[in-house]
Image (tube, rainbow, N blue to C red):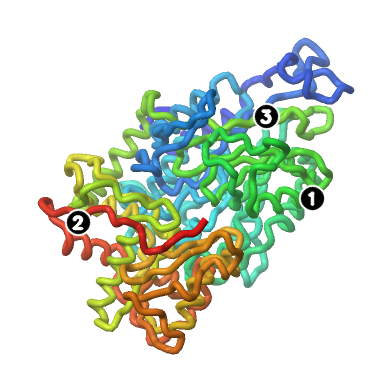
Amino acid sequence: MPATTPPHDRRRRRTTRLLAAAAALATAGALAAALPSAASAGEKTGKHWPGRYQDVQLLSFNDLHGNLEPPAGSSGRVTEIQPDGTTKTVDAGGVEYLATHLRQAREGNKYSITAAGGDMVGASPLLSGLFHDEPTIEALNGLELDVTSVGNHEFDEGARELARLQKGGCHPTDGCYGDEEFEGADFPYLAANVLDEKTGKPILKPYWVWKKKDVKIGFIGVTLEGTPDIVSAEGVKGLSFEDEVETINKYAKVLQRQGVKSIVALIHEGGFPAGTAYNYDCDAPGAGDGISGPVVDIAKNVTPQVDALVTGHTHAPYVCTIDDPAGQPRMVTSAASFGRLYTDTTLTYDRWTGDIARTAVSSANHVVTRNVPKAPDMTELIGKWNALAAPIGNRPIGYISGDIGNTGTESPLGDLIADAQLAYGKELDPETDLALMNPGGIRAPLTYAAKGAEGDGVVTYAEGFTVQPFANTVNLQDITGAQLIQVLKEQVSGANTAAPKILQISSGLTYTLDLTKAGADRVVTDSIRLNGAPVDPSAVYRVASNSFLAGGGDGFPTLGQGTNDLVGADDLTALEKYLTANSSATSPIAPPKADRITIVK
């Protein structure tokens, strides 16, 4: 699609794509073995009429998070299992390549839908985040996205800002970024389980129906019920988040009453496959045996009227079948994150019943490799926004001697950020004792190799923004030693029992994490030390953390009980100040050792 096509023409072209063109004939050979024995895939009612079955292509992805440019470091790679059982990593991602892959995948598929599982925006790199994610919405329009669910990050700036992304209009504070007013998303955001507390109604459409000739497929979109626990309170003010299963089942009945029997659920909640490779077989040895997490219970309880689940949130890749409540296998997919993968699912539509022939559904994840031509319209879009961002983003803020990663139970970058917040906390109050950082707030690694003309080892403001894009403030608060111990135990208990969130800790704080034990016992109380001394349960400690954690976010309610609060500048400012004060071109910061937590397995 030419980059010069104006938005209103894009909308017309999408309408043409959906409503025009003759129906493709079903391929008998591909389906005959899988379809019900009562009918043949090759049945036709006449020379000019389609057969009983129609393959519909469903392309999907999730958790893009505004990553328009190829993500850096490990965030821009996927792991692939080779035929001999070994693994290799493959560079992946970038909307210039994603556009090409999606367009190539659609070739020859007249019945094709593109859907997403939420978190298209939020926690975005500077290129998108600096402009309130308008660049990402423009890119998604160009990718011809048809529909998406909301995710938790769609609420980072609140429901009103989400409505602006949907409907268009200039930002209420920052105004317009160009000569033209922002036109909003060409595709619907679905928010079936996000209700306005005053009206009790969904804040956006709960469902959407795709139609082409006589084929109809309904989409229901939900985000995780626990969104308020992982988003700032201001972002979800006045909203209630309902149970995912109950909501999907409710609207599946609504669609059925409207004659829509083929249904796909877009769910911003996910699972954890036992293998990390994108092509790991999570159905080995049996259906869904290789995956755990919230999506498993959801899949087992969502009504059999729903034919497939497109999921997200956990940033994990998987294509699994999990039995529905009737004991029948149903496809459940996720395409990792950051635009590194897309999922290609074949839904076989039965014209006689109006439903999907579930036994014929097939699906696979595909890598968004960088060895294909870049889509020129996406290159132009990135160039346009980069020109606006460059004066801010290209400014050097520090120097590093090697990659500083953000993966692992304790990460080198987690240590660095915690140290930066401790140093900034001491500027605000010399009595500050320690700092805690939530791992989910660290969105990308710092890489040694230059992304642009800045030179190797130079950390730019744009790179720092990509790491910490939330604009949380650094807050100080007093907690007792007993509360500090409880906070550490909350990493692996309570809301974090099933999926532990291990806080990144500042220099001087050490303890042992015994993974052979269960729940809160995994934090060995007697091992907790601050500057070599045992933590005194009755003493008061001054703790620095970001405002999200300080408010009890991410399942740490005890942090929300702190007293004597002092609010500082944003967390990126703290990181910038630390890098500037502790590094130079001739004396760069070395990656921390990440040895503050002793892990027993």
Q: Secondary structure at mark 1?
A: helix
Rounded to the nearest whole Å, what is the CA distance between mark 1 and mark 3? Answer: 25 Å
Q: Secondary structure at mark 3?
A: strand
Label pair 1/3, CB-CB below 8 angstroms = no
Is residue 351 visible to the viewer in this orientation of the structure? yes
Residue 174 or residue 332, whichever sits in front = 332
Please state which amino acid type lies under the numbered disc 1: Lys
Rounded to the nearest whole Å, what is the CA distance between mark 2 and mark 1? Answer: 55 Å
Asked whether, in this view, residue 441 is left or right of residue 354, the answer is: left
Q: Dot 1, how many residues are within 10 Å of its Cα: few (below 14), some (14-19), or many (20+)?
A: some
Q: Which residue is mark 2?
A: 397
Q: Return the mark for residue 216.
A: none
Q: Position of residue 290 (x, y in %)?
A: 65, 42
- Tell me which residue sits at (72%, 35%) in the image: 216
- Tell me which residue sits at (54%, 28%) in the image: 85
**Tag nearer the camera, 2 or 1:** 2
Q: N-terminal of the two: label 3 or label 2?
A: 3
Q: Dot 3, how many residues are within 10 Å of its Cα: few (below 14), some (14-19), or many (20+)?
A: some
Q: N-terminal of the two: label 2 or label 1?
A: 1
Please state which amino acid type lies under the numbered disc 3: Ser
Which corner quadrant holds the N terminus?
top left
Q: Position of residue 457 (x, y in %)?
A: 20, 46
Q: Position of residue 170 (x, y in %)?
A: 38, 55
Residue 215 or residue 502, whichever sits in front = 502
Q: N-terminal of the two: label 1 or label 3?
A: 1
Residue 379 or residue 37, whichever sits in front = 37
Q: Dot 2, how many residues are within 10 Å of its Cα: few (below 14), some (14-19), or many (20+)?
A: many
Furthest residue toward top: 47
Q: Which residue is mark 3?
A: 362
Q: Secondary structure at mark 2?
A: strand
Q: Which residue is mark 1?
A: 253
Asked whether, in this view, residue 240 is left or right of residue 476, the answer is: right
